[in-house]
Amino acid sequence: MITLNPLRWGKQYESLDFNDVVHFDTGEPIARIGTVGGGIVGRDLRVAHKAREALLEVPTSELLQMCRKAAELFEKETLPVGDSQQTVDDFIHQQSASTGLPEHMCRSNMSKNSFVLSNMEQILDCLTRGLDLSILSKGYGEEGRGVTVSYQAQTPILGAILPNNSPGVHTLWLPAIPMQIGLALKPGSQEPWTPYRMVSAFIEAGVPSAAFGLYPGGHDAGGAIMAKTARSMIFGSAQTIAQHAGNPKVQPHGPGFSKILLGDDIVDDWEMFLDVMVESVLSNSGRSCINCSGIWASRHTREIAAAIAERIGPVDVRPPSDPDAQLAAFTVPAMATGTYAMVQQDLAESGVTDMTAEYGEKLIEREHCAYLRPMVVHADSPDRGVAAKEYMFPFVSVVECPQDQMLSRIGTSLIGTVITSDEKFIQDASRCVDIDRLNIGPLPTNRLNWLQPHEGNIIEFLFTNRAYQIEPMPATASV
């Protein structure tokens, strides 16, 4: 059984306390993780500046080459992880076994992380608007307009409290390394695999090991990272995100409430966009913040909901090794039963209809895990409570709403796909402050353009643009 030890600025630490990582379906241990408390994390963070200093010794151009090498190692090679040599297949099996994700989804998320690392140079070029990255290293430089520009790092390291539900979100912290910002990561208790393998790939590719801290542990370990780093990101529920709203030191990532809006000019031809809607709801077992949780239209909403239900309602539980598996397990059964109870409350409201009722039982309970099969719900008005809900399985509400009310009623949406040719509707959507990422046209919500920022630009989060003036010193008078 593999053992994963904490990493304290590149040095493995032999813990006194361990937690087991168990198989989601059998309950058998598949790994053990050494844990640390908040005191150890706090002590390490006192010398966090050394992580950035180690990275500043390596030119950014070389770090970008190392990112490309790390991408290849991460996706294709055997790597030292914990006390074992981990093959790619080992990684896929272990991640699937602890998270409940089907193996082909684990491979897909692995490829996503590798793609971002491979294309880091282009991604940073877009996120910085073509800024010479050496300016981030030096702190100032000439941009080419005869003006000195300066960007000041706000932290020597980026802290991150990592999730269990979707390995693809690890793409969000990867750009820190080529920007010469160290990492203090608290891995998820059920998904430690991606951060451990990724850090190993970085180190094998030549990135200084002193840039990395991996701190598995309880809430006190995560609390120490949040309290003692000047910039951190956290993944969690809506309640978790609300706790950090307005805090400039924290970048919270939670439910996306992503939506598809069908314009009046195309809604009569909604069948043309059925594939887009189904993919947006069902991909990655509905676990991502970029999955669609609401489809809004002014008419044909019952027909739309019925058509989506016909496509995804029959989806059933399959073994995680099945390439056609489309559902991930809830590794904590109480989460599934609690979620289903909330859905039942939604369905009790007048004007709400379960369009997947005819496709059998939705809650599938096993001894150590549970599943929720896909659900499509029709709401006859945005006033219905379900119109503002998001759940961690393939679930979507199809909401009937006049087009001229949509943008004022949809609420905060990480991704808004607006399918229309109506220029006024496009202009109004472009001005809507409630949509973070805006897609115009039939783009599934789960398809990201990595050359665009995701939930805030990480460059702007880690660096601040400031004034920097240079006046030449006068010549020293000769004696």
Image (cartoon, rainbow, N blue to C red):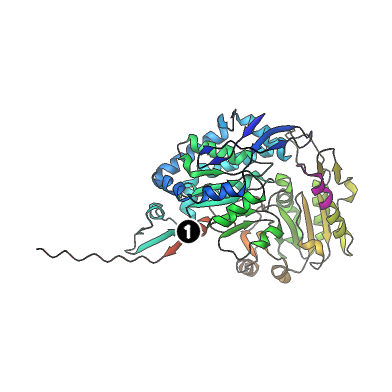
Location of residue 89 in the rendering, given as x and y in whole percent from the top left corner: 64, 30
Q: Is residue 75 magenta?
A: no
Which of the pair 195/268 is nearer the observer? 195
Q: Quadrant of the C terminus?
A: bottom left
Location of residue 247 in the rendering, given as x and y in whole percent from the top left corner: 59, 64
Location of residue 383 in the rendering, given as x and y in whole percent from the top left corner: 81, 68
Which of the pair 49/301 is nearer the observer? 49
Q: Is residue 329 magenta?
A: yes
Q: Is residue 386 above or below residue 60?
A: below
Looking at the image, residue 471 sits to the left or right of residue 270; the answer is left
At label 1, counting other C-alpha atoms closer than 10 Å, the crowd grade (few under 14, some 14-19, many 20 or more) is some
Q: Is residue 21 above or below residue 459?
A: above
Spot the residue most to the left: 479
Looking at the image, residue 14 sits to the left or right of residue 353; the answer is left
Asked which quadrant contains residue 473, the reply is: bottom left
How many numbered marks appear?
1
Which of the pair 351/58 is nearer the observer? 58
Residue drawn at (77%, 55%), measured in percent from left and top? 396
Examine the rendering and report whether any part of residue 55 can be seen.
yes
Q: Quadrant of the N terminus?
A: top right
Span colored in magenta:
327-339
Which residue is denoted by mark 1 in the rendering? 154
Looking at the image, residue 374 sits to the left or right of residue 51; the answer is right
Q: Amino acid at mark 1?
A: Gln
Q: Secondary structure at mark 1?
A: loop
Examine the rendering and report whether any part of residue 417 can be seen.
no
Residue drawn at (58%, 59%), measured in percent from left and top? 250
Location of residue 294 in the rendering, given as x and y in whole percent from the top left corner: 75, 58
Q: Is residue 26 above or below residue 334?
A: above
